[in-house]
Amino acid sequence: MRYLLQILGLSALLCAPGTQAAAADPAGSKLSLPVQKMSVDLETGIVSRKGERGLCLETVSQAGPHKLVVRKNPGDDRPTVTVNGVEQGWVADASGRARMGALRLARDGSLAVLRTWKTGEKQTELLQDGQIARSWARDRSVKLLRYTTDAVLLLERQAAQAWRLNRYLRNPDGRIMAQAETLVDFGTCEPGRLRIAGDVLWAQLDCGAGEDTGIYRIDLTSGTIGTPVMSSRGAQFTKLPKSFELSRGQTVMDVSGTPAALRFFYAVSGLLLSQTGEVRACSSDAEGLQSWNQSYRLRALSSLYEKTGAEVFARLTLKSMRLTLAANDALQNRADPDGPQCGWSSTIYGTAPGERLTLMINQAMIANALTGSCKTLDNLCPQDLAKQIAETNACLARAYERDFDAGLGLYRINGEIDFRFAGKPAPWNWQIAFAGVLDALPDTDLKARARDIVGVFLDEWEQDENGGLWRYWPKGYYREKGLTPEQLSTQRYEDTGHAGITLLTLGDFVSGARAEISEAVQKRLDYLLDFGIATPRDLDGGGPQGDRWFPASGWSHYATPMFEDIYSAPVPGHSSADTLYAYARLFDASEPFQLTIDVYSCTDLCTREKELSYASLDAFMSGNPFFRISAETPGN
């Protein structure tokens, strides 16, 4: 309750004299999503949906007579899941040591969910009512699309092979059978959003350059992909209020406009229409949701507030910050005596049930997002919040002091934890991210250490004709393994994902006088983008290629014209948190804003039925059909 009371103070703060005026939304206190039948009280942070209320109400869905509700309280490791009001304890039991996907409820009341492990064999498992129905090796990618009384539909891919839509039938006892029937082989096409209507699959596919990217209608009885019914990279499925009186069929919108408008559209759609009300901010970091999801969303929200002055972004930023701090281990009475008293521990990296590890990189991701967002909000960041963030940073610096190796000039991974790399020099993304934590402190010695760490990184930096290069580990790691300089030179370079984490903070140290570093990163970025959507895993072009390696997060700090152009349309994983941050960072409110949304109804063909046009940011924020920001009235 004390966390709710803290959030209740947001309205008074935001309305106080001298605070920045909201430039792009009405003086509102309620965010409403009409189609989803949900709202967020922006003063209290309470989310309401289909008769349910809560600070972190993640899911409310209906399947036949059965109702699924998923919610969390501040600091929860695991969600509370109920079906028809009865708690499903098996979900909590199955959570914690692996990442859980979205739950799917069938009309017979059965639940299915994917679980992905970060330790051991790193397998993915399909759970049905608490039982493992199917398992895939670590080289497989799996997405759960639909779960019915008859079957489960999964999107599957083995490394370097095509995506396939597979159907697993349920036997007369309701159990998912082991054998799959492939309904569609997508070949060279990369599937985006998919919709299933009877024997028809509606698919958003990227099948290469030209007119092969867009919306496809695929007959599931034959599985033939054919040609798109709408060719457009900006086309995507949507739902609109009934007041639009559209024809029956699949509703598709084709979004076009100026680069600034498109980047804002993709950023705000992902932030306000997904995880609406920052419902995952209640999570602990057991599954990495604070470090790898909420930290990016927090950065994105505060960035949009800074650029637009829209009050909705400030309110959601503050709610997220409050709840992230409330999820801290010490406040949840689960701090490990051997770990930081001020951190956010994870359970997915441990090797034993219930084991909690407080890894330095996770702490840095969370702490840097809190520090940066408070700074961005400026006088809207309350003094008590700023003080708590500063104290947390100082506490983290003290906690990891024992892991600093003065001889190396770098941090080591805690040697006393049960972790595969315990005692080894920490990877570069850990080092640079934690340098950001140190640099935020007033201690001049720690600030100097932060700069020295970056100096060691740049000493190991390499360049070739395609730009800057570095490896995942510092050279000290390889030397301690006994590698010779020749052997070290054959070790693979950093992957694009971890490189993006390093680049989130690197620019705070190397801007201005070290312009050549930025130029080398930009050259490397364009080199990667030349591969197309299926970018390589590693910086030098090595490793497998696929859209999962598409640059996001910190790469946006070194945006090139090519990168900016690509981010004026949907990119792979465009709703993931690190990509939303990239859209938000690239958005420039000073650039021209013109957005057009053409609405189509698709059956055998797609017919345009509506055109929505917005000549300004204010016009979109106040007049779009997806969300409304309004003042509360008595009785609402």
Image (cartoon, helix red, strand yellow):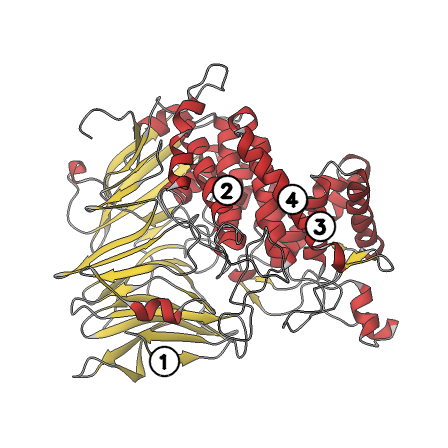
| Residue farthest along the left direction in this orientation | 65
Q: Which residue is mark 2?
A: 298
Residue 571 placement, left or right of 155: right
Q: Which mark is residue 393?
A: 4
Label 1, residues with CA under 10 Å away: few <14, some 14-19, many ≥20: some
User: What type is the residue that disc 2 sits on?
Assistant: Leu
Q: Which mark is residue 134?
A: 1
The mark lying in front, picked from 1 and 4, is 4
Q: Is residue 295 above or below residue 410?
A: above
Tell whether label 4 touches label 1 (CB within 8 Å): no
Q: In the picture, residue 270 is in which quadrant?
A: top left
| Residue nearer the viewer, 581 or 217 | 581
Tell whether label 4 touches label 3 (CB within 8 Å): no
Which quarter of the rendered picture does the N terminus lie within? top left
Q: Which mark is residue 567?
A: none
Q: In the picture, residue 85 is in which quadrant?
A: bottom left
Distance CA(mark 1)–CA(mark 3): 45 Å
Q: Position of residue 490 (x, y in %)?
A: 78, 72
Secondary structure of the residue carrying tag 2 is helix
Tell whether label 2 touches label 3 (CB within 8 Å): no
The mark lying in front, picked from 3 and 2, is 3
Q: Which residue is mark 3?
A: 398
